[in-house]
Structure formats: structure tokens, C-alpha cells
Amino acid sequence: MPTIEEILYTELVDPIELTDVNDTDLCMFSFNDKCYFIDGSKYLVYDGNTIAEVTPYVPTLFISKPPAGGGTAYEDFNLLGSKFKDSFSSDGSATVYQMSLTGLDTSPITAMVNGVQKNEFTDFTVDRANGKITFNSVPATGTNNVIITASKTIAGLADRIKKCRFHTIFGGSNDTRVFLSGNPDMPDYVWRLGLQDPTYAPENGFYKFNDRVKGFSKQYDYLVVHRENGYHQVTFDLNDQGVASFPSKPLNDQVGTISTKSIQIIENNPVALSKNGVYMLTGSNVRDERNVQHISAPVDAKLLRETNLKDAVAYDFDRKYWLIVNGNAYIYDYSTKEWYLYDNINASHFIELNQDLLFGSANEGLLYRFKREDDGFAYNDDGQAINAYWKSKYITFGADEYRKLVEKVFYSLKPSSKTSVDVYYVTDKKTSEIIKTTRMDLFDFTQIDFSDFTFLTNTFPQENMVKVKAKKISVFQAILKNDKLDESLGILSLGVKYRYQSLIK
């Protein structure tokens, strides 16, 4: 049975027709060899051959039920459907059986008596208003031997599930249940579907929180519920009778999540965008305002000025946390703890397929793939040159009180098929033009260009030097840049030769 990634690939080469589906983000998940879709008003399932509306599970509300009513509560009503069962134990004398619900639908009611199917009108009559079934003949004595199936439609119940916009799969140490949320009419609710059964939404299988739920993540064998103003933790438990429960407790009430699609797991820790930046949840056992770590401080000055932060999209790829908003990419390399900024990435969705990172652009309705370094002509942005640059900080050389003379800048490039660097500098007195351009191309049959032909095959970095002679300055900044089509830029080292001059007066 295909995974979601394989279905995406199938969509590209052999389209699957999805008719009458809302033009919106799909809540989509695979479970038990089937793929499920929720589009805001419909709940569909794909079994590998056809796509159809989900057929709701029919729960048994009561078991061991006497004909007059009562019995032992067994399962909750299914929010997704209208059908339900009652399991009666016949006393061998009663013909009237009282259902658990009244005001039954006009759809046919059926019964199984001692394993034999009985039909309305032929074998029994129905008082739908009062929920009473009257058999023509007395059912024989037995335990749970009379099972009656009826329907009761309650307006709006199915929409609680069908309007959900995001999900997770959780069951403690095993992924046994689907959890849903994001219903715009009930944004503070989470629903838990049935054990190994996404077609069953128990009526009482819900949580209600103090504020809007924005998404889910999993940490170890806990489920983390991301709220606008904090975090909750859901755990799995079994009582002495083997009945499962999912208790919830708050973790943090200071840092919340504003973007559902920003949630990712980074080195076993949930990461998400809040109204104050990107935070990592580092502890999920104790309620504590210190169990979150602010990781986006270096880029917050730009990031938090972005509009529509609630629409930010994130993905974890190549040990980097990619956060995209308004076409700007804020990329956190969690191996080096550094942030990088890209632009012109109008991603609305990400997916990894065959070790490639792909993104869909809602602006253009196109699917893009990021090139690999070994792709031919890898260094361009959809045919346009990439404006790549590196700037040092403003350097005072440890002596703010002195004027300085900067004589030379040393730097090394990472050799590549086509690469070069333009060197600039900025001081408190001037911004320079290009003071030197250095090439470090490697001989490569796949990208021969006789305008800059080279026999260089040495892949080791080589030091370069440019004379500067910036006199009587207070601060200095080096800028290394490449904005040429199909060229890469890798800066491996930088050194500055300087001398102190006179004291500042």
C-alpha cells in the first residue's frame, strides 16, 4: 500500500482524480495501509484503487442491556456517523426493547436475534419517537443475543471532525490512534479517534483547552499539544482493567505557538514559531517556565517584522530547520548553531522525496526541487543568479580608542567547478568598490567555459590576499560576495592584517 510520498509521486506521473474536493490544504495521513483526506467538509479514504467517503464505524453503545433499558455502557456514539447498536440480553418473555436513544431516523432498522437477521415490518415494528422496538415473536433467552442497529442523525456532530485542519498519530510508545484539531468553529478542542480505527470518533474522546490549539508534536512517548499561549502534554496510561486513557497536563504557560506549519522535531525536541521568535521545548516532564529555549535571537530583528507569521512553514532537512515566511527563508543549522537567510523561496508546503527536498508554491501552483551540489549548473535560482555574500561584523580590533591602518585581507575559497568572489570593505569613512575578484574554478568537463578556462584540479583551499590600505579608521568590515549565474561561493577563512595608529582625539 502506498505511502503519502508515493502517492505524491503517483500524482506527478499518473494523476489520481480527486473530484469535488475543496480548494484548500488537505489534512492527510496514512493509517493501516490506507490514506485519509479531510478537506474541511468531507472525510475521504484512498485504498490504493479508489477514493470514497469514509464509512463510519458503527459503535455498540450498551451491552448486557435488559429489554426495558439500562445495561452496561460499552462504546461512545460515533461523531462521524448516525448508526449505533444496542446489545440486549433477552429474558424470554419481553417483546418490547427500549433503545438507548430516542427520536430515531427513518432509515431502516435491523436486528440480529441469536445470529439470525430480523427486518423491520416483517419481524418487528418501530416507535421511532420513543426508540422502542416491538418483536412479533418473543426472542429466546440469552446473553447479548439481540443486537439492534438503528440510526440517529445529530446535526453538526460530523463537522467537528470534518472541519479539522491538522492531525498527529499517537498512542504512547505505539502509534495507535489519530488525534485531530484545527476546527475553526471549535479551535480549542482536540479529538481522539478510535484504536486502530480512523473511522471512529468517540463522542467523549475530546480535550478542551483554555486557548486555540495550533498543532502537535511528539517527544519520546509523549504527545505535545501546541497552544497559542503554552504547551500541554498528553500521555498514555492503562488502568488495572486494561482500559486505556490519555491524561493531559500543562507544561508551560508563557511561550506558545502561532504557526501550525512551523512545528518540527529537532534532535528530539519540539521547535515552533511563537509571537516572540522560534523556541525549542527542552523538557516535557515538569511544568516549568524554563523548559523552553529561545533559539532565534540572532534573526528576530528581521523575522519578527515579517507579516503573516501565522502562515510560516517549516521543515527539517539536512540537519537544518527551514522556516519560510513571505518568501524569506530563515535556516537554522543546528549542527553549528548558526542562522542563514535566503530569499525567493515561496514555499507553502515541503516534502522530502528520494533524498531530495521539494516544495510547493501556492503563488504559482508549481512544485520545485532544490538542486544538489552534484547537479549540473546547480547554482542558480530558477535560472537567475544567486546573490550570495558574507559580511564580517564591524571590527574595532580590540581598541576602540585607536585609529587603525588595515593593510591586507587574507581569505580562502572552497574550489568548485565555477566559483569566484568579489571583495569589498566598509569603514567608518567609506564603502569601497570591488577591490579584487578571485576565481577558484576546477577543471570540469560538464561545465567547460573557455572564457574562464582552467586546468586547476587541486581541491584544497588556497589562500588569497588583497591589499586594502584603509588609513586612520575606527571600524572595519569585510564583505565577500558572488552574484554571478551558475557560480558557487564557499568562504573557508578570513584574516585581516592591521596596525594601530594614533589615539582618537
Image (tube, rainbow, N blue to C red):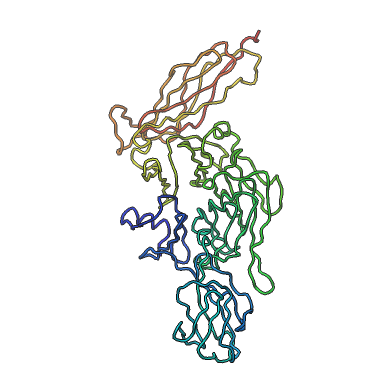
Residue 395, placed above or below residue 16: above
Of 8 and 243, nearer the camera is 243
Of 324 and 44, nearer the camera is 44
Of 477 and 382, nearer the camera is 382
Residue at image location 57% in from the left, 73% down from the top: 101
Tell whether 73 sits left or right of 5.
right
Q: Within the image, what quadrant is residue 277 found in?
A: top right
Percent position of residue 436, x then y: 42, 20
Residue at image location 64% in from the left, 10% down from the top: 504
Percent position of residue 131, x then y: 55, 76
Residue positioned most to the top: 505
Q: Within the image, what quadrant is residue 477 found in?
A: top right
Of 269 and 58, nearer the camera is 58
Tally of numbered discs: 0
Residue 178, placed above or below residue 230: below
Percent position of residue 229, x then y: 64, 45
Q: Quarter of the image containing the C terminus? A: top right
Residue positioned most to the left: 450
Whether residue 269 is visible here, answered yes or no, is no
Tell whether 439 sits left or right of 182.
left
Q: Quarter of the image containing the N terminus? A: bottom left
Whether residue 136 is visible here, answered yes or no, is yes
Tell whether 17 sits left or right of 176.
left
